[in-house]
Amino acid sequence: MSEIHRKTGVILALDVTKKEEALLISKEVAGFVDAIKIGYPLVLGTGLSIAKDLSKIAPVIADFKVADIPNTDRLICEHVFSAGCDAVIVQGFTGSDSLMECVKTANEFQRKVFVVAEMSHPGGDYFFTDAVSKEIAALAKKAGAFGIVAPATRPERVKELRAVIGKDLKIISPGVGAQGGSAADTIKAGADWVIVGRSIYGAKDPKAEAEKIKKEIEKLI
Ligand code: XMP
């Protein structure tokens, strides 16, 4: 287990499906990202044991968008943390009891929970309206989550959600690069980390791409 600290401001979304490729890319970009986000593509492709392999390279965030009743959420989170993941992404629309169970389980393992406040794709604000996103962000804070997920494709929403949660919670933001979001705009709006997938792992030179984004963020400081 390792803590997620902000050094570069970049999180790699590792949505490749082969173990060798996942490990190769992760080792290449290791100094340029603060964590590696894994999700269904990689875990269904390789098995959850990939988490332990990757955790030797960087902290691992499991993007399973957990959204079930409290008992099932707890069982999922226990597996995720036992497998070596340092944090898990969960949904907040399931309500406070489900969310609190995820946070309670994370606390037992001394791990972290991020709550999806609003999604980054074009349809992401269809149900996650302004009011709903803010309510979920407020609930994440009340439940004791470590942070929220907010869309880099809508930096103005990152700014508004930052105002809701204050300084205590972290914001991780997907949508940079392939989905059109800008790393600099997202960090300026109040995100702690940008999450970048295809632009890095799909690049000819993933290391150079990760370094470019790291430098773009560094310039803001
Ligand atoms: P790309 O390739 O678009 O990858 O850079 C983005 C990564 O982030 C995930 N994603 C999200 N996860 N809330 C989340 O919890 C979101 O709003 C969201 N939007 C994208 C996506 O699955 C991919 O891994």
Image (cartoon, rainbow, N blue to C red):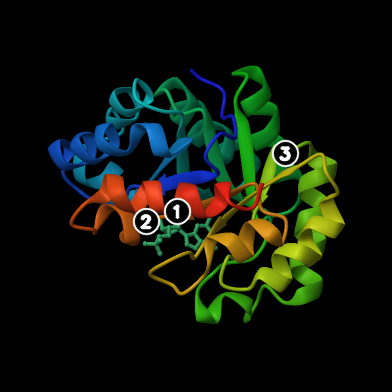
Measure the C-alpha gap from mark 3 to mark 2: 24 Å
- Give the residue drawn at x 27%, y 52%: 201
The answer to whether residue 93 is visible is no
Q: Secondary structure at mark 2?
A: loop
Disc 1 residue type?
Ile
The amino acid type, in three-letter code, at marker 3 is Ala
The nearer-to-camera label among 3 and 2 is 2
**Badge 1: residue crowd in 10 Å (few <14, some 14–19, many ≥20):** many
Rendered image quadrant of residue 134: bottom right
Q: Which amino acid type is shown beneath numbered disc 2?
A: Gly
Report if the beta carbon of the residue with label 1 is closer than 8 angstroms to ligand 1. no
Q: CA distance from mark 3 to mark 1?
A: 27 Å
Q: Is residue 163 left or right of residue 78?
A: right
Q: Position of residue 98 (x, y in %)?
A: 68, 44
Residue on which disc 3 sits? 145
Q: Residue furthest front?
A: 219
Which dot marks residue 213?
Answer: 1
What numbered label is drawn on residue 197? 2
Report the residue at 51% width, 55% height from top.
216
Residue 161 seen in the figure: yes
**Which callout, 3 or 1, points at the residue further toward the start of the chain?**
3
Give me the residue at 62% from left, 66% from top: 185
Quarter where residue 203 is shown? bottom left
Return the disc, 2 or 1, that comes first in the chain's sequence. 2
Label 1 near label 2: C-beta < 8 Å? no
Of discs 2 and 1, which sits in the foreground?
A: 1
